[in-house]
Image (cartoon, rainbow, N blue to C red):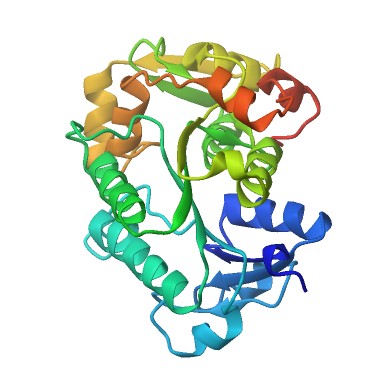
């Protein structure tokens, strides 16, 4: 197997990991999926390896000399048992060390749109620190700062579908904050190019879709004419629910939405050369149902 064609995916059982793994497998890549215990059954590409924290000795012989590692392990909502620092930062350090020991020279990392040195948000701070670990590692890297990645069973669509089944979609505040949804298959195409093309060498790019749309507008399009009640509640109430783990979104989810972060799609399109799908096409093709 050509070195470049063998790729390791951490977090291979997650939404992005599953979709990227399937896409790369169909395009001739040999995928080595790494998953946590009892998650192997969700993998339909490659023979999954179980790892708790990427520190196990047995990993080295199984992934040595692969062309790249796609590091998709991440935490979007922290708890006392699963803190951002532990998952987003420490596990990234472990991934870097594993790459070096296994002679893997390229790492692709999905970060978050809005990550910045000046951020005060816990999630963004952890992602920024993870980015810095990668940048200083000496490895080739592509860091992709993602907006909302959409596709069948993506986290945002699942949240909205749960609310639809309950008869009402809740929008925090005005709903006029913007998002840039990007289709998961387009994400997979970008990642494939990140592995194979030199123009992605040591690049940080915004992983964002063609259209910039308000959350209000996206929700109405998502409902697709169904008679679903859409209710805007004041942000204070939404935040209180999030603090008590009662609402559809976590505290940091709300902060990211309200942050109104907009990325540079033109740069992504110019470097990748990909024709990206608009989110309405994905909705109309039932790509989110």
Residue at position x 54%, y 71% from top?
A: 35
Q: In this view, does 180 lie above or below 174?
A: below
* Residue 260 rendering spot, x and y as whole percentages: 36, 18
Q: Nearer the viewer, residue 169 or 217?
A: 217
Q: Nearer the viewer, residue 83 or 55?
A: 55
Residue at position x 44%, y 23% from top?
A: 170
* Residue 60 rendering spot, x and y as whole percentages: 51, 84
Residue at position x 52%, y 59% from top?
A: 106
Q: Nearer the viewer, residue 201 or 171?
A: 201
Q: Which of 81 and 149 is in front in this view?
A: 149
Quadrant placement of the N terminus: bottom right
Q: In this view, does 271 lie above or below 110?
A: above
Residue at position x 54%, y 17% from top?
A: 229
Q: Can residue 186 be seen in this view?
A: yes
Q: In which quarter of the image is residue 100?
A: bottom left
Quadrant placement of the C terminus: top right
Residue 122 in the figure: left or right of residue 104: left
Residue 77 in the figure: left or right of residue 192: left
* Residue 202 rendering spot, x and y as whole percentages: 46, 45
Q: Is residue 79 visible?
A: no
Q: How many numbered marks, from 0 up?
A: 0
Q: In which quarter of the image is residue 26?
A: bottom right
Q: In this view, does 234 lie above or below 268?
A: above
Q: In which quarter of the image is residue 241?
A: top left
């Amino acid at each position: 197997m050509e070195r470049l064609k063998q790729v390791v995916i951490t977090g291979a059982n997650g939404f992005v990991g599953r979709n990227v793994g399937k896409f790369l497998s169909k395009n001739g890549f040999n995928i080595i999926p790494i998953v946590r215990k009892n998650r192997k059954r969700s993998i339909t590409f490659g023979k999954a390896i179980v790892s708790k924290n990427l520190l196990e000795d047995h990993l080295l012989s199984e992934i040595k000399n692969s062309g790249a590692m796609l590091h998709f392990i991440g935490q979007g909502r922290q708890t006392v048992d699963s803190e951002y620092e532990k998952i987003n930062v420490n596990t990234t350090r472990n991934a870097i060390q594993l790459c070096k020991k296994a002679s893997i020279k390229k790492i692709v990392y999905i970060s978050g749109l809005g990550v910045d040195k000046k951020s005060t948000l816990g999630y963004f701070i952890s992602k920024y620190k993870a980015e810095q670990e990668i940048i200083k590692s000496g490895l080739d890297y592509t860091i992709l700062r993602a907006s909302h990645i959409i596709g069948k069973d993506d986290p945002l669509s699942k949240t909205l579908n749960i609310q639809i089944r309950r008869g009402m979609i809740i929008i925090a505040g005005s709903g006029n904050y913007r998002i840039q949804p990007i289709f998961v298959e387009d994400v997979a195409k970008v990642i494939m190019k990140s592995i194979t093309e030199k123009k992605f060498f040591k690049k940080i790019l915004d992983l964002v879709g063609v259209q910039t749309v308000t959350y209000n507008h996206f929700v109405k399009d998502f409902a697709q004419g169904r008679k679903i009640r859409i209710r805007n509640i004041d942000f204070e109430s939404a935040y209180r629910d999030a603090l008590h783990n009662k609402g559809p979104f976590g505290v940091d989810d709300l902060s990211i939405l309200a942050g109104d972060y907009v990325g540079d799609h033109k740069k992504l399109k110019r470097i990748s050369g990909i024709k990206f799908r608009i989110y309405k096409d994905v909705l109309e093709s039932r790509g989110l149902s």
